[in-house]
C-alpha cells in the first residue's frame, strides 16, 4: 500500500503544485474550525494537525508501513501562566524513517 495522499491528510479539496499547497478551510469545518478571513495562524495550525491526525494514526501505520508520520494524543494537564490556569492538550507527532543518523529533513517523509 502507498503512503497517505494529500487529500487524506489535508482534506478533500487540498491541492499542490511546485510552489504552493492549498488547503480549503471548508475541509476543516468537521474538526471544529470556523472559516473566516481572520483565522489566527495558531487556529489554522491546530485544525491542520487535527485533520491530519484522523489519518496519521498508529493503527493505520500498522497496516500501511509506508506511512512515516503518526499523530497521537498525549498528556492533558493544567498549567498556570501568570494568574491564569490553562488546559494544555498535548499531541505527539512522530516522524519515522530508516536510521541514517541524519538531522530532521522534511524531504525524508
Image: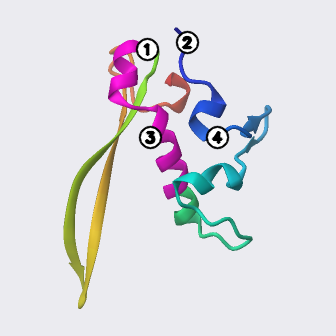
Magenta residues, start to end: 46-65
Residue furthest to the top in view is: 1
Question: Where 25 sits versus 10, above or below?
Answer: below
Residue at point 40% right, 23% down?
60
Give the label on residue 53, or none.
3
Q: Is residue 40 visible?
A: yes
Provide the major secondary structure of the magenta segment: helix
Question: How far across and how far down the image is residue 73, in percent?
Answer: 30, 46
Q: Which residue is mark 4?
A: 11
**CA distance for labels 2 and 3:** 18 Å
20 relative position to 92: left or right: right
Within 10 Å of disc 4 (Cα), the crowding (few <14, some 14-19, many 20+) is some
- Decide whether residue 56 is among the magenta residues: yes
**Marks 1 and 3, the one that precedes in the sequence:** 3
Crowd rating for badge 3 (residues with CA inside 10 Å; few <14, some 14–19, many 20+)? many
User: Which residue has dot 2 on it?
Assistant: 2
Amino acid at each position: 500500500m502507498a503512503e497517505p495522499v494529500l487529500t487524506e491528510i489535508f482534506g478533500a479539496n487540498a491541492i499542490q503544485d511546485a510552489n504552493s499547497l492549498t488547503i480549503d478551510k471548508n475541509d476543516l469545518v468537521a474538526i471544529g474550525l470556523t472559516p473566516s478571513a481572520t483565522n489566527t495562524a495558531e487556529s489554522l495550525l491546530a485544525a491542520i494537525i487535527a485533520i491530519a491526525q484522523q489519518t496519521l494514526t498508529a493503527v493505520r501505520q500498522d497496516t500501511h508501513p509506508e506511512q512515516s508520520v503518526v499523530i497521537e494524543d498525549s498528556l492533558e494537564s493544567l498549567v498556570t501562566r501568570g494568574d491564569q490556569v490553562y488546559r494544555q492538550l498535548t499531541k505527539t507527532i512522530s516522524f519515522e524513517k530508516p536510521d541514517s543518523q541524519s538531522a530532521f529533513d522534511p524531504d525524508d517523509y
